[in-house]
Every structure is written in structure tokens, then in C-alpha cells.
Amino acid sequence: MTLTERDTVLASTDPEIARLIGAEEDRQRDKIRLIPSENYVSKAVLEATGSVLTNKYSEGYAGKRYYEGNQLIDEVETLAVERAKALFGVDHANVQPYSGSPANLAVYFAFAQPGDTVMGMALPMGGHLTHGAAPTLSGRWMNAVQYGVRRDTGRIDFDEVRDIAKQNRPKIIFCGGTAIPRTIDFPAFAEIAKEVDALLVADIAHIAGLIAGGAHPSPVGYAPVISTTTHKSLRGPRGAMLMSDEAHSEPLDKAVFPGLQGGPHDHTTAAIAVALKEAATEDFKTYARQIVANAKALAEGLLARGFDLVSGGTDNHLILIDLTNKEITGKKAAKALDRAGIELNYNTVPFDPRKPFSPSGIRLGTPAITSRGMKETEMSHIARFMDEAVEAAKRKDDDAIDAIFGEVKELTSAFQAPGLS
Ligand code: DSN
């Protein structure tokens, strides 16, 4: 039963919004959701997100608020902070950033001045907008220098990272990104950051759940500052956290509040606390390992069908495909796949000759489908569906694409999605 069919207060107050939410729930149930930064949160996380904590203002930090009535919010935020510290093994955690981009802005605000040199992975190479991309504040207000991957391996070239760092002496080096299919070598980044006396910041937004579950090495001990969103592989609400050693904690806190933000979103804080509790369980460790096993199985299936995977495969949750050899653009393929019930995003690939709005690649990942309990067997079906949909798109065969959606629905109907009714 979806929200549209249920007799809810929302349905009687605002039937239009209730209908749209219900339809979105159906869409999330029916489709194979492969966007690597998305997931299905638990019912418990949804309940905390939709709680009365949304009614409260709490500017400040626990025990030091600028509004009265925060006795219980202090307990909620302290629980979230302590759980983050225990789960990731860090000295300090700030759970107030509204999302990943504000969290990274807080890092610049805390440790650099406008015009300072900062270094990050270029967006088309797998980095994030906030790591110095030209149209963003980080690219316009900072002197941003960017590193990429090797053309022959699709992997980060640490000789290049070292050369750029030595030539430019950045104040901050960001590692991590949004389209990196391989393990991030935190010790190698730390060595270079030390050589040039830069602050290493690990943006683990994509892989936070893998790190929490022991399926990817941790940056703790290498990156004094760690930034993450909470809604990707970590399977929490839309939000973010900044973590650090003791030495960097005070500037970070001051940068988040009052530097950049006003009142924290207390309902989100509560939901982050719930997600962190869930992520500390043995079940979550199994989940994190299965995300990687599924991504590897899906990569194998796609390679066997002639897909060209950037870096030749994956070590984590994410697969980046260069479709040039398939003679279809990323955008056309993504749209056809969506029609076939397979949701992913078109994406630039390293050294892409095409523009970001119609690039050569597609990006996909396994956190959401693994939350539904899918395993290696289902990955081989998904590789086949993807291959058939791409071939159908090339022949402009919409009937074949629609028939694939029928098979997709048959598959997804066998796997309950967390949080959906
Ligand atoms: N938009 C996110 C992603 O899809 O990777 C990064 O912020």
C-alpha cells in the first residue's frame, strides 16, 4: 500500500502532495535504483526525520545554546556526536552541516582565506564540485589547482598529485570525490600533504558506509579533517558531518556555527543518530561487504558484455562506464535505462571529449539495491537488462525497452525496500 492509497492526515490535508509522495514511493519500489549516492533509509530514520524536532531552534552546541528549551535536543545531538566518534574512531564530530557542500565550505572557512591555494580532484576526473571546480565558490574565491587520473589506468597518479602540490603549495588538499571506482589511498595523500605542509581533508561522502562497515580503509590517522554526507552508503537522512582530531575541532565548529549556518536541523540530527546506531551493528558490516561484492559482480557482468569500465573495474560501490565503444552517449543511455526501470546518471568520464550536459559515460552503484537484499545473482540479471536496454536504445526500439521494465518490476517486486510501506 502506498501513501496515495492510505487514509493519512497528509492525504486529507494536501492530496496533491500525498499523491506525488505515494507515486514516488511506487517509483522507488518498482525501479532498480543504481545512483551510487542514493539509498533507502530505514523506517526508524524516516520516523526521526518526520518528528516534532523539526519545530525547534537550537543555535549553538549542546550546553551552549542561544535559545531556551534545548534540554532534550542537547541529549539528541550529544548522542549523534558520541555515536559518530565511536563509529569512525575520531576525536571530534560536528553533526550540524546541512549537507556535503556546506560542510566543505565550512572547511575552507575554518582553514583558508579567499585567494589561498587549495587542491582537489577535478570534477570530470571524479572529484566533487566543492573541491575547486571553476563555477563554484571554491573555484572562484580560492586559487584552486586540480589533479586527475592517469589516462592509461584511470587511477589517481600520485606523481602528478605530488608535482602539483609541490609547485603550488596548497593550504588544503582534498581527497575523495563522486566518481572514483577505486580504493582511496589515504596514506599516499597524507605523505604528500606532509611534504608540502598542507591540511589533508578526506571527503568520504560516497564511502562513509563502507568505512563504517570495514569494507574500505579509514582515513583516520591520515586526514586530520574528514567530511561526509550522511545519506549515501551510510544510509542516514540528508545531512552531513565534519570529523577531526582535537587540534582542528574548534575552528571547524566555529566555521559551521556561527560562521556559515544558523539553527541546526534537529530532526535530521536525530535521524543521523539513528543511522549511526544502525551502522554500528554486525548487520551493517555484512551490508557494507555485500555492497562491494555486488559492485564487483555487476562490473564483471558488464565487462563480459563489452562495457568499458573506467579503471577496468571497481573496488568499492561505484562503477563508471565509458560508452564510447558502444556508440551511444551517456545521456541517451541513461534516459533509455530509466525508461527500462534502471535508474542511474549520465556522467563525464576522465578526458571526456564531450560536454558535462551530454557526456560519454554513465555512473552507477550498489548501495540502494544492496539495501533491498539483492546479491550476486541479481547483479547478473541487471547487467543483462542494462546491455539489452542500451542495444534497444541504439535501435530506437521503445517496445523492447518497455518490455525490459516488465522484467525489472518482476525482479524488484521480490525484494522489499527498507522504509517503504
Ligand atoms: N550529488 C552527489 C553525488 O551524486 O555524488 C555528490 O554530492
Image (cartoon, rainbow, N blue to C red):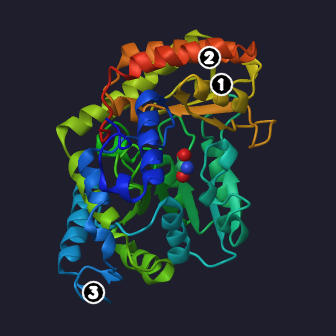
Determine whether, in the image, residue 314 is placed left or right of residue 46: right
Q: Residue at x 59, y 29 (%)?
A: 338
Contact between labelled residues 2 and 1, with CB atoms less than 8 Å apart = yes
The answer as to whether callout 1 falls within 8 Å of ligand 1 is no
- Disc 3 marks which amino acid? Lys
Disc 1 to disc 3, C-alpha distance: 53 Å
Residue identifier under label 1? 336
Q: Which one is earlier in the sequence, the residue at label 1 or at label 2?
A: 1
User: What is the crowding at mark 2: few (fewer than 14 residues within 10 Å), some, or many (at least 20)?
Assistant: many
Residue type, mark 1 in image? Ala
Q: Which mark is residue 108?
A: none
Q: Callout 1: helix, strand or loop?
A: helix
Residue 69 position within the rendered picture, expressed as x and y whole percent measured from the top left: 22, 85
Coordinates of residue 323 in the picture (x, y in percent) = 70, 24
**Which label number is shown at residue 401?**
2
Q: Where in the figure is residue 24, as x and y percent of width and height?
A: 46, 41
Q: Earlier in the sequence, mark 2 or mark 3?
A: 3
In which quadrant is the N terminus drawn?
top left
Identify the residue shown where x is 60% and y is 44%.
158
**Amino acid type indicated by mark 2:** Ile
> How many residues crowd around disc 1 within 10 Å: few (fewer than 14), some, or many (20 or more)?
many
Label count reads: 3
Is 400 in front, or is 202? 400
**Which quarter of the rendered picture does the C terminus lie within?**
top left
Residue at the disc numbered 3: 64
Q: In the rendered image, is residue 177 in sight? A: no
The Cα atoms of the two marked residues, 1 and 2, are separated by 7 Å
